[in-house]
Amino acid sequence: MSATATYAFMGKTILITGGAGEIGRATAHRFAANGAAVVLLDINETKLAEVAQGLKDYGNPVYTFCCDVTQSEAVAQAFARVIEQVGHLDYVFNNAGYQGAFATTDEYPEEDFQKVIDINVVGVFHILKAAARHLRATGGGAIVNMASHAGVDGPPNMLAYAASKFAVIGMTQTAAKDLAPHGIRVNALSPSLIGPGMMWTRQTELQAGVGSQYFDSSPKVVEQQMIDSVPLRRLGRLEEVASGVAFLMSDEASYITGFNLDITGGQ
């Protein structure tokens, strides 16, 4: 697998939640470039339109739907509209998420903890359930849930995010067993440090502001500290995350289910 690997998605359709975000956008471009029709779901209608406009040159169908994944009825209605307008789905990238606050465990804000769980766990569950029902009814397909290396090795000062991503990996393993008899593969992807971009900048700035023993108070120093923790001494790229999603959806991964692809730069 490489960031430039080409997979055959001609005539296929992928639904991407968090489609207006950085990873959603990169993944949408990867699949559109390889022939797929793309369905984007996000709560931010303006950014959805921007991403959709950027996909037009590929010449494949692009659809956008505004949806709050934390609301089960909203997800059900969104899937109903998708099926009505688009028809068949082959792949679902369950990607919508929220990074949350940065604080030590004893200081972590309860309201933010709940928000992280609502989006990253409950929202992932809503999409997973809706996708499973559709794919089971139509003969199978593939789902990739967005986890994180934070769900493999919990980072300091990210209690809610780590908890949510451990949960996503657990849901993936159970759903893979439940859905395998119906021809549905379910896998997870766990990127580590990915950038540059808004999430990378936000992470370094907020880690610097916590005042913990693990990171400096300067975001620039924190940035280097984080990169130095990666064996390859560089950030992962958004395109490399998209490549991981493409591989897990592809025929080359047709025997893989219940797997967490941990992208950690050599760790």
Image: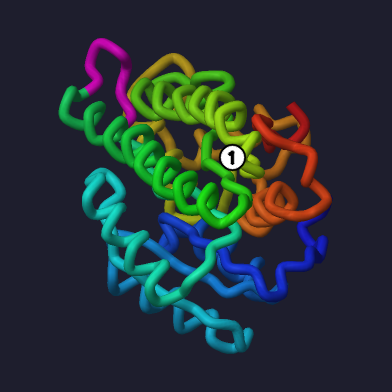
Task: Say whether residue 13 is left or right of residue 62.
Answer: right
Q: Coloring scheme of the render?
A: rainbow
User: In this figure, what is the number of numbered marks?
Assistant: 1
Query: Residue under circle 1?
Result: 193
**Residue 224 % position (x, y):** 59, 37
Give me the residue at 33% from left, 29% from top: 102
Task: Confirm whether the magenta stretch covers residue 105.
Answer: yes
Name the residue nearer the viewer: 224 or 202.
Answer: 202
Task: Confirm whether the magenta stretch covers residue 49.
Answer: no
Span highlighted in magenta in the image: 101-108
Q: Residues within 10 Å of mark 1 (few under 14, many from 20)?
A: many
Residue 189 seen in render: no
On the image, which quarter does residue 63 sit in?
Answer: bottom left
Name the residue nearer the viewer: 203 or 167.
Answer: 167
Task: Say whether residue 129 is left or right of residue 9.
Answer: left
Give me the residue at 24% from left, 20% from top: 108
